[in-house]
Image: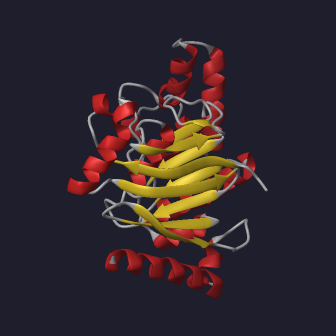
Amino acid sequence: MPVPVIEVKDVILFFDSGRERTRRARVRERVRAHSRVTTPELSGVNLQIKEGEIVNLVGPSGCGKSTLLRLICGVLTPTEGWIRVYGRKAVPGRSDLGFVPQDALLFPWRTVLANVRLPLEVKAGEKKGEELNKKAREALRLANLEGVEEKYPYQLSGGMKQRAALARGLVTGNRILLLDEPFAALDDITRTQLQLELLNLQARMGSTILLVTHNIFEAVFLSGRVVVMGEKPGRILGEVVVDLDYPRNLRIMGTPGFSRKVGEVQALLEKAWRD
């Protein structure tokens, strides 16, 4: 049985101050105290993701989907429980994990090439070098964004900006991509195009992808599993296995199998709303 590349075990998160959160001896005492007076951001979250999977997180706004991504990145620390990536504790700045936010967050004073090259500069501790440019150009090629290396963000469309953000997430050779609603701000045509490009990219690279979205159709179209979360506290209500063949194309959305999986996700979401 394949070993999970991402493991989330019994995670509870309260938003304490960072100073309090580092005092490990007080963790259990804080959990007990908090449970009497407030609701945790996340409670009892368990999740395993195998290498090469595409998994989508869906759920109501505020249920902790983006927070869970940040815990896996190591930017946040669980109050209780643990998270491991490739068997090691989740910590910020891992070279095998890339994060793509909803907003592309490109620096306006840097060219597209320089924006994509930035993680390499941080990792290598240098700002110049043809080797870095070569890797950045390869990442742009993978993201289908060749020919715009010397343009600035204001010269790009929304879809091109998101491709640049995706290239930046790929540039250090990341084996895992965490995507936080990367297509939410795009028009439907551009969004569909990028969905197809993401599937093609994953097929070529074999990346493990964990994606947050509010779009049920997008979740079912892209993923092998859809994990549904509820709120107050944030928790996992269940999952739907999407046993539709890859590679996928847009015609699959008109099939009874696709409609059935959408209905299963909607049923779990209705449970979240009732709870």
| 186 or 220: nearer the viewer | 220
- Residue 240, horizontal then vertical, whole percent: 58, 73
Residue 38 seen in the figure:
no
Q: Measuring 38% from the left and 45% from the top, which residue is drawn there?
A: 103
Q: How many numbered discs sit on the rendered protein?
A: 0
Tell which residue pokes out farthest to the right in this image. 1
Q: Residue at x 33, y 80 (%)?
A: 274
Q: Residue 114 at what x, y percent from top left?
A: 49, 25
* One can see residue 150 in this view: yes
Q: How is the image coloured?
A: secondary structure
- Position of 157 compared to 136: left or right? left
Residue 190 image point, x, y percent: 48, 59
Please state which of residues 253 and 66 is positioned toward the viewer in this rendering. 66
Q: Is residue 211 left or right of residue 200?
A: left
Q: Within the image, what quadrant is residue 226 found in? A: bottom right
Furthest toward the left, the residue is 37
**Image quarter for residue 84?**
top right
Q: Is residue 96 left or right of residue 162?
A: right
| Viewport quadrant of the C terminus | bottom left
Q: How far across and down, in percent of the image, does residue 242 sit?
A: 64, 72
Q: Is residue 113 left or right of residue 249?
A: left
Say which quadrant the N terminus sits in: bottom right
Q: Nearer the viewer, residue 25 or 8?
A: 25
Q: Residue at x 39, y 32 (%)?
A: 24
Residue ID at (61%, 55%) = 48
Residue 252 vertical position relative to residue 229 in the rendered view, above or below: below
Give the answer, above or below, for where 271 lies relative to 195.
Answer: below
